[in-house]
């Protein structure tokens, strides 16, 4: 009887069962809550292929689980130290912030950093840059490429000159969610299997969802976000390729601000877009902002910006200053 209900509910695979909440499954299958919970548990057991591991086991056995500890360098030693080595190579890292905060600058620098050999913080492969709103900043990329020998003084000059940076960044423009999904499910696996790329950048993740879904479509938008997150996680885990998503921000409600202030907590004026459905897909969330101050020497003339760790499994909430100049993104040592 259960399989009959599942068939009529248009659930075509075991994995589809886990994309629905208990309430949704009860509604579309007409099963009792205990039966739905039993069904989800059976689906989870069926899909569980690997032996369960504790966080302590992963931490102690660094040689046995290298991808859990390897990071992708940001191309700056100060920012790398701040992020405990850089961006995790398995999972989705989000960078949220207002316009002109430096989000695209950081994403471009990661696209160059990933091409360096592993001993210099890279992954020895290229990147794919998916644009969902603005045209790809080709002119700025060329400026960064020409300045790599200055920014990456830690890398021997002959290695920097041997890398053809511009030839290893694949650019894709997507105008709707269907095109984005098609790119993720069909195009990216080909590049990943060939070893041509090891970094996926989406700039930005919120643009398409804000355009295609109204406020009344919150439930449908949440399911699309969960599905997109699952696809990105699958690629990241299968190919040890970090996913770096730029996100927009939205203003916080005044009522929420007053509650936070009443509790003695600092209220933020903005928060990342897309809500909790998307937040649950992330391994690490960073927020950047642009201040009204000028960076101290030797960063004379640059605008001071802040990078904040909102949540991460290996880093406590913390803040670092950085600036952007012709050579790229540079952290500021506040000590």
Image: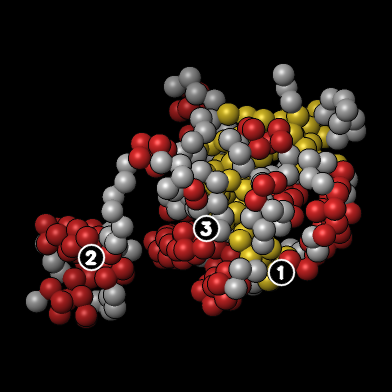
Q: Which residue is mark 1?
A: 171
Q: Earlier in the sequence, mark 2 or mark 1?
A: 2
Where residue 169 sits: x, y (%)?
73, 65
Q: Earlier in the sequence, mark 3 or mark 1?
A: 1
Report the mark closest to the observer, 2 or 1.
2
Q: Rounded to the nearest whole Å, what is the CA distance between mark 2 and mark 1?
A: 38 Å
Q: Which residue is mark 2?
A: 46
Q: Rounded to the nearest whole Å, what is the CA distance between mark 2 and mark 3?
A: 24 Å
Neighbour tally class for label 2: few under 14, some 14-19, many 20 plus, Cα within 10 Å: few
Looking at the rendered structure, the secondary structure element under dot 1 is strand
- Residue at point 76%, 64% (across, down): 136
Pointers 2 and 1 in contact (C-beta within 8 Å): no
Looking at the rendered structure, the secondary structure element under dot 3 is loop
Q: Earlier in the sequence, mark 2 or mark 3?
A: 2
Report the mark closest to the observer, 3 or 1.
3
Q: Which residue is mark 3?
A: 240
Where residue 183 sits: x, y (%)?
58, 74
Where residue 318 sits: x, y (%)?
58, 29
Q: Rounded to the nearest whole Å, what is the CA distance between mark 3 and mark 1?
A: 20 Å
Question: What quarter of the picture does the C terminus occupy?
Answer: top right
Q: 54 or 91, which is in the foreground? A: 54
Q: Is residue 270 above or below residue 36?
A: above
Neighbour tally class for label 3: few under 14, some 14-19, many 20 plus, Cα within 10 Å: many
Left or right: 105, with 188 as reference point: right
């Amino acid at each position: 009887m259960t399989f009959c209900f599942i068939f009529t509910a248009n659930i075509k695979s075991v994995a589809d069962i886990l994309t629905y909440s208990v309430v949704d499954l009860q509604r579309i299958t007409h099963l009792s809550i205990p039966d739905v919970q039993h069904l989800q548990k059976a689906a989870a057991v069926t899909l569980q292929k690997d032996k369960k591991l504790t966080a302590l086991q992963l931490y102690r056995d660094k040689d046995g689980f290298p991808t859990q500890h390897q990071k992708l360098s940001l191309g700056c030693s100060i920012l790398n130290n701040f992020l405990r080595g850089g961006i995790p190579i398995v999972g989705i890292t989000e960078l949220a912030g207002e316009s002109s905060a430096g989000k695209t600058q950081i994403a471009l620098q990661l696209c160059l950093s990933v091409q360096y050999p592993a001993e210099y913080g890279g992954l020895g492969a290229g990147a794919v840059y998916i644009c969902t709103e603005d045209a790809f900043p080709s002119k700025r990329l060329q400026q960064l490429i020409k300045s790599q020998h200055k920014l990456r003084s830690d890398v021997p000059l002959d290695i920097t000159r041997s890398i053809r940076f511009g030839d290893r960044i694949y650019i894709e423009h997507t105008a709707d969610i269907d095109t984005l999904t098609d790119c993720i499910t069909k195009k990216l696996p080909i590049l990943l299997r060939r070893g041509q790329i090891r970094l996926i950048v989406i700039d930005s993740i919120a643009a398409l969802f804000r355009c295609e879904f109204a406020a009344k479509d919150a439930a449908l938008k949440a399911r699309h976000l969960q599905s997109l997150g699952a696809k990105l996680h699958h690629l990241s885990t299968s190919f040890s390729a970090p996913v770096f998503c730029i996100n927009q921000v939205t203003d916080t409600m005044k009522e929420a601000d007053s509650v936070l202030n009443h509790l003695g907590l600092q209220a933020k004026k903005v928060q990342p877009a897309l809500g909790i459905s998307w937040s649950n897909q992330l391994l690490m969330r960073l927020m950047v902002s642009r201040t009204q101050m000028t960076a101290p020497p030797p960063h004379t003339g640059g605008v001071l910006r802040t990078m904040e760790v909102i949540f991460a499994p290996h880093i406590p909430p913390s803040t670092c200053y950085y600036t952007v100049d012709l050579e790229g993104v540079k952290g500021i040592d506040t000590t």
